[in-house]
Image (cartoon, rainbow, N blue to C red):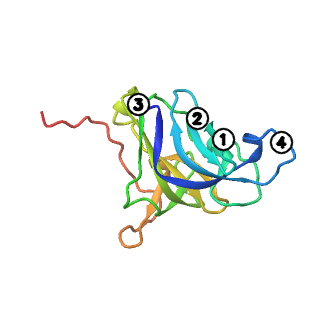
């Protein structure tokens, strides 16, 4: 699999200028097209964008992006990304059924918060020790936090999906982690 991954559909985002411009006086967020990501062990997810001035920038940290044109405010990387990439190989998965659904965002201890978000797509690491261990394997979802348009990379166990025609949410479900490698042979 790949270290650099194209997004299934490009996303319009905005980039904080101090991440991409040498002009210290530029304050407004810069329109961009987010077209890909990179995964490198021990590093945060890298975001590849095309700026409106035609420049391509690779490996931006996720906290440099916003999903809406708003007043810039800093957010620590550790607030939006749970952990660094743990392998060289991954795939981007954007299931039509889940993409665009609202979610409740759980804190790092899996407790309820008042934060809500919207699912965009997920990153699934492949072929490394964590991905091969059922109790450790998780999809890492890009979630747009609704209150401030911050993009987050959250493991699936930190979001509760709200699908009005199907789900009934009453707190944090007591989900059991998979711990068996299932095989028919």
Query: For the view shown, which residue lies furthest in the right direction?
Result: 25
Q: CA distance from mark 2 to mark 3?
A: 16 Å
The quarter of the picture where the N terminus appears is top left
Relative horizontal placement of residue 164, taking residue 49 as reference (left or right): left
Q: CA distance from mark 3 to mark 1?
A: 22 Å
Q: Horizontal and vertical percent for residue 23?
A: 83, 42
Q: Is there CB contact under 8 Å for labels 3 and 1? A: no
Q: Is residue 107 above or below residue 183?
A: below
Q: Is residue 23 visible?
A: yes
Query: For the view shown, which residue lies furthest in the left direction?
Result: 185
Could you tell me which secondary element the residue under label 3 belongs to? Answer: helix
Q: Is there CB contact under 8 Å for labels 1 and 2? A: yes
Residue indicated by mark 4: 23
Indicate which label's residue lies in the foreground, 4 or 1: 4
Q: Horizontal and vertical percent for residue 129?
A: 39, 26
Residue indicated by mark 1: 77
Residue 44 tag number: 2
Of mark 4 and mark 1, the one earlier in the sequence is: 4
């Amino acid at each position: 699999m790949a270290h650099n991954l194209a997004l299934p559909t490009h996303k319009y985002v905005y980039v904080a200028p101090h991440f991409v411009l040498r002009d210290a006086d530029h304050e407004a967020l810069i329109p961009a097209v987010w077209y890909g990501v990179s995964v490198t062990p021990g590093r945060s997810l890298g975001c590849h964008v095309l700026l409106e001035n035609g420049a391509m920038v690779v490996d931006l940290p996720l906290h440099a992006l916003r999903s809406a044109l708003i007043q810039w405010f800093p957010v620590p990387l550790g607030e939006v990304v749970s952990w660094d990439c743990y392998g060289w190989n991954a795939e981007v998965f954007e299931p039509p059924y889940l993409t665009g659904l609202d979610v409740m965002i759980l804190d790092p201890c899996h407790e309820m918060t008042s934060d809500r978000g919207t699912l965009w797509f997920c990153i699934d690491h492949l072929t490394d020790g964590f991905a091969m261990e059922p109790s450790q394997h998780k999809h890492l979802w890009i979630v747009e936090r609704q209150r401030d348009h911050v993009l987050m990379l959250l493991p699936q166990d930190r979001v509760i999906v709200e699908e009005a025609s199907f789900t009934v949410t009453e707190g944090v479900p007591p989900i059991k982690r998979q711990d068996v490698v299932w095989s028919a042979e």
